[in-house]
Image: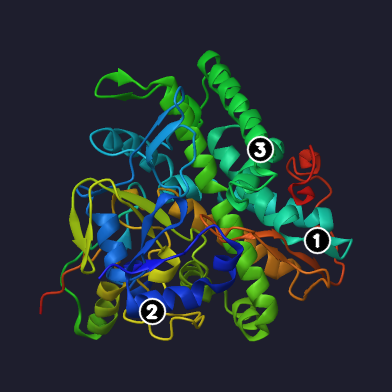
Amino acid sequence: MCVLACPEVFKLDDETGLAFIPDGDVPPDLAEPVRQAQESCPEEAIDVVD
Amino acid sequence: MKRTVELDIESAEHARNWKSTARDLQETCPMAWSTTHGGFWVATRYRDILRLAQENDTFTAAKTFDPDTGIVEGGTSLPPMPVARLVPAETENPEWEGFRGLLNPRLSPKAVELLRSRAEGFAAGLIDRVIETGRMDIVDDYTNPLTAMVTLAVLGIPPEEWRTFADPLHALTSLRKSDPAYPHAIELAQIMDKRIEEEIDRRTANPGDDLISYLLNSKIDGQALRREDIHQMIFNVIAGGVDTTASLTANVILHLQENPDHRRRLIEDRTLIPKAREEFVRYFSPLHGTVRTAKTGASVAGQNVSAGDRIYLLLASANRDPEIFEDPDEVVLDRCPNRHIGFGAGMHRCVGSFLARMMFETMLNEFLDRIPEYEVLAEGADRYPSISPINGWVRAPISFPPGTRRAAATNGVSEGDQGHSPGDR
């Protein structure tokens, strides 16, 4: 669900079905969608570090 | 203080009033004790339900069934079903990891994508069967056959046999276990079990590249799988693949009839569908709830849960918890963030969620392309008598301006009408 909130940062692994982040550094203009992605994760698996 | 309620999650009353019941319990007693079905806790808050699904050392889905005594312990159904455990849904570690590890790659986004064009062919063929008549039953003519056909394709079973598999599941999930028709549903399930056994034999002799052959050739820690576990994995895939997504899609097609503005937005902008799909999973929560059993004592929402206590995780209620979702009773097509747990959470989170999403998109796109205008017929749609475990529809007849067929030959769909209709019940 993070992939839906911010497809620029979060990608879905075709083999495992798990979301991953190819590049951990988020451009400033994507900060808000990344926050939304964090809030989209029911498993609370996403940490955002400022 | 322990609050006792008479909440029967299988009852017609619950099907009618679950939203107000859940909201009341969330506000006044988020872990309530129901006296029905031998006594069980009802969890209604998102945070508690997430914890119950994630803390697997304390709360388990594992089930044991002794066919000689008929005694059932644990498991994910309430009341308990006196049948063998679902694999992997009703297993725990160390076993679970091996079973789930085998299924994951077979239902990955990549594996599912390979099935999409076949699913599209099935969807087009099913609409072709009814498009010239101007009438169809959303459940019986479309969502039930499509989900069953695609699931059978995963297993390598001929899709035209879909009724053998879809009918018993439809009956088993929709009827109360006390319903006079329930024994008939059990008989149908036995026919399905026999077909699964035949398919295992067939694949043992002649392996293919299907899921059944794959399971037969797999090893966990160097050991081949036991036949009964393979059987129950096949059954679990069918049970998870068919009625859940069929119910979601039927709910959505009915919703879009009542909300033409939503229909118009989706027809005009198909890029909305992924977010809308998640919102529909949240709003309709086709899996109404699931069950865990406490392995040890624990405190949940201020209540003392004892070892052995059964707990109903009302997923539909979690998905409408106002603490998590703004305007929880509204369908917001582009809701974001949307952290619904309609596919469950934790280790037993739906293994088929990518398959479900692909089938839903395929069905909705084909339906909106071919039948953009429709009315629910006067005799009306009938909801399942019991909305637990699956909140779906027995029938949902519609009428529409007749259209034309896409193709003369249709992917095995035309022979699909075997046996009687599940609508006969």
**Residue shown at the point (79%, 68%) measured from the top left:** B398
Amino acid type shown at disc 3: Pro
Q: CA distance from mark 2 to mark 3?
A: 44 Å
Identify the subunit bearing mark 2.
Answer: B
Q: Is residue B79 above or below residue B386?
A: above
| Residue situated furthest left in the rendering | A50
Residue B136: mark in rendering? 1
Residue B118 in sight: no
> In the depicted view, which residue is nearer to us: A20 or B425?
B425
**Residue shown at the point (54%, 54%) measured from the top left:** B244
- The residue under label 2 is B336
For label 2, count other residues whose C-alpha is less than 10 Å away and answer few (under 14), some (14-19) or many (20+): many
Quadrant assignment, res B219 = top left
Earlier in the chain: of badge 2 and badge 3, it is: 3
- The residue under label 3 is B183
For label 3, count other residues whose C-alpha is less than 10 Å away and answer few (under 14), some (14-19) or many (20+): some
Residue B171 in sight: yes
